[in-house]
Amino acid sequence: MTTGVFYAINKSEQPEVLDGLHIYNVADITEKTLPTELQIGWSEDGWIAFLIINKHYHAIFDFGLRAGYCRNGIPENTGDWALVNERQLTEEVMAKYLVVDEKRS
């Protein structure tokens, strides 16, 4: 494995990958021996998923808006599922979704 990807999956009888967001390149991780805490959180209504690594948000999928965001905005939106073109998880995007996630806590 050379990269870490966070996938949005359709959980129907015929599961399919809807979208994928680049999270990291293994070669870029300097401290590979340190323990890592990974969490996947969900909004109360189940429409928003959060990828949290070592207490930092790395990606968000908004299934209602059909949007995916990650820190580096990779890959560009070329699929049929996602409806947003700007995929970078900026502080502005985070502010919108942290309100949702704080309600979950």
Image (cartoon, grey):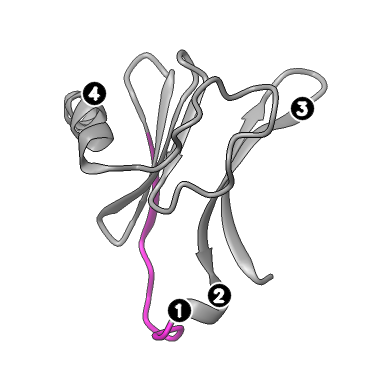
Q: Percent x, y for residue 84?
A: 49, 24
Is 17 positioned to the left or the right of 49 in the image? right
Q: Which stretch is magenta? A: 30-41
* Majority SS type along the magenta span: loop
CB within 8 Å, label 1 to label 3:
no
Q: Indicate which disc, 2 or 3, sits on the residue closer to the N terminus.
A: 3
According to the picture, the residue beneath numbered tag 4 turns out to be 100
Secondary structure beneath label 2: helix
Instruction: Tell which residue pokes out farthest to the right in this image.
Output: 14
According to the picture, the residue beneath numbered tag 2 turns out to be 26
Is 91 positioned to the left or the right of 67 in the image? left
Q: Nearer the viewer, mark 4 or mark 1?
A: 1
- Vertical side of 96 occupied by 34: above or below: below
Q: Amino acid at mark 1?
A: Ile
According to the picture, the residue beneath numbered tag 1 turns out to be 29
According to the picture, the residue beneath numbered tag 3 turns out to be 15
